[in-house]
Amino acid sequence: MTTAGPRVAPIATPDTAPFWEATSRGELALPRCRSCLTYIFYPRSHCPSCFSRELDWTVLSGMASLHSFVIAHLPAPGFDPPYVIAIVELAEGPRMMTNIVGVEPSPESLELDMALQVVFELQGDVMVPRFRPVDEGK
Amino acid sequence: MSPMAIVGAAESERIGKVPELSALQLHIDAALRAIEDSGIPPELIDGIATAGHPPIDVAHYLGIRPNYVDGTRVGGCSFLAHVRHACAAIQAGHCTAVLVTHGQSGRSRIGMTYPDPGAESMHGQFEAPFGTTGPVSMLPLNVLRYMKDVGLTHEQLAGVVVAQRQWAQRNPRAFKRELLTVDDVLNSPYITYPLHAPECCLVTDAGGAVIVMEAGAATALGVRKPLVHIRGSGEASETPMITTMEDLTSSQAFRTSGQLAFQSAGITPEDVDHLMIYDAFAHLPILGLEDLGFVGGGEAGAFIAEGRTAPGGQLPMNTNGGGLAYTHTGMYGMFAILESVRQIRNEAAAQVEDVRVSVAHGIGGMFNHAATLVLSSEAA
């Protein structure tokens, strides 16, 4: 049961455009403060920790851990319930919202703090970052 | 500082399913009933505060010309913040009587005009692409982390519903009045794992309104009902997105708002006879009890499961049945204030004995904001 319409796609703004340009290249990137080295999520044009405007866009590892999640049982445009909405903690520190893919959307298959890696999926004309469990064999 | 009071308070005549009224009409029905409840002449009202609808729309429809306008919109706790702001405005001499209104046609969707933040907003870029469908898919995102780090069982979480249904059963206006057991809750379908349907708020139509005045001025005017003194207040913001909360197991906004409210009232949690904690979902009263200092970290689940907040318990909480069982329009905060007012006035459906001090605590958005009021039958 999917509700009508496609998944909604993000529209970049000047401060976030490098994030979405990076995802289109298959990379996860965030601005990092040159002064205090804080990674900034969501992307902003200054550092909210020390108020510096000197930032460097930095490519991240794409590795994360499952910080918390829900399993949505109500439909959303373009999503078939049940599906997993999660907060992941990136290896570099910040937390972001995402979906967990490549695993059964069941409590038994998902364990808090499990290791995840980023994958990118086309949504509209934007590549959106999602996460899947790390392949044990690799 | 001259003491401030709530001098008039009312809900719309009907709540629950009210398809014959638009959201704006629900504001107005409640406002007219609050004015009648107060007994003050409507022309005395020179301040308006509301969230959702623009305050000028509400003022003009009602027929007043305010010179104090507060359109602070910080989610469901906006109305608690409005009361706090109104006290400051009256204290500063900006106005005499502030009408705070709420109306939402959450269930019937009549005249609901709220804008979507859009795909360019930070929500649109970093939350909506992941299939979020409003609070129901985002606000429970911290539950599993809380369960693992702090310690809470699914049975204890269900206990929040069990306790509040006991209050709702005593309230003829409550939307869901049947008693539930822990097993009933756990055997209900999931809406958003780990939350079952009875652990998620209702979606209803309703309006509510309160009038704030300086206590001495209200007494001189001869208001109809006993004053509900505003002894203290607090509010605080943390983040627009739940993902960027500092700690998913404890709300910074809850803690700061609560501390400010208790400090300004000169009370501690031990002084509180009655408590309202905005319960859009069953885990909010758990974080609220801990973050406001009523119990220690990790103790709230057992505290509620043991019946301490249920009828006959030491800390009666959410005595109207709460957003889980009484009513929940979308921005529930007004109804938390109104139940505190009724308990202090001794006119609640499930009346608690000797309520001198009542605390109403509201959440805004996804732990974005919080606001807290300390209300009392006594001025000091």
Image (tube, coloured by chain):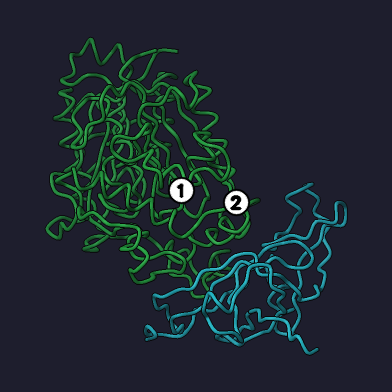
Mark 1 is surrounded, within 10 Å at the Cα level, by few (under 14), some (14 to 19) or many (20 or more) other residues, namely many
- Give the residue at x 25% y 38%: B209
- Give the residue at x 71% y 73%: A19
Question: x, y percentage for residue A61?
Answer: 81, 75
Sooner in the amino-acid sequence: mark 2 or mark 1: 2
Q: Is residue B68 above or below residue B266?
A: below
Task: For marks 2 and 1, give the one nearer the viewer.
Answer: 2
* Amino acid type, residue under disc 2 in the picture: Val
- Please, which chain is the residue tagged with disc 1 on? B
Q: Secondary structure at mark 2?
A: helix
For the residue pair B217 and B338, the one nearer the viewer reads as B338
Q: Which residue is mark 1?
A: B364
* Amino acid type, residue under disc 1 in the picture: Gly
- Quadrant location of the N terminus of chain B? top left
Q: Is residue B292 above or below residue A121?
A: above
Kindly check if marks 2 and 1 are in contact, taking CB atoms under 8 A apart as contact.
no
Which circle marks residue A40 in the picture?
none
Chain letter for the part of the structure drawn in green:
B
Q: Is residue A10 above or below residue B14?
A: below
Please identify the quarter of the rendering in which residue B145 is found: bottom right
For the residue pair A2 and A57, the one nearer the viewer reads as A2
- Give the residue at x 15% y 56%: B18
Chain A as rendered: colour: cyan
Q: Secondary structure at mark 1?
A: strand
Please identify the quarter of the rendering in which residue A65 is found: bottom right
Is B365 left, or right, of B19 in this rendering?
A: right
Which circle marks residue B150 in the picture?
2
> Residue B129: in sight, yes or no?
no
Instruction: In the displayed orientation, state which residue is furthest to the right.
Output: A35
Question: x, y percentage for residue B114?
Answer: 36, 59
Question: x, y percentage for residue B350?
Answer: 21, 37
Is A119 left, or right, of B198 in this rendering?
A: right
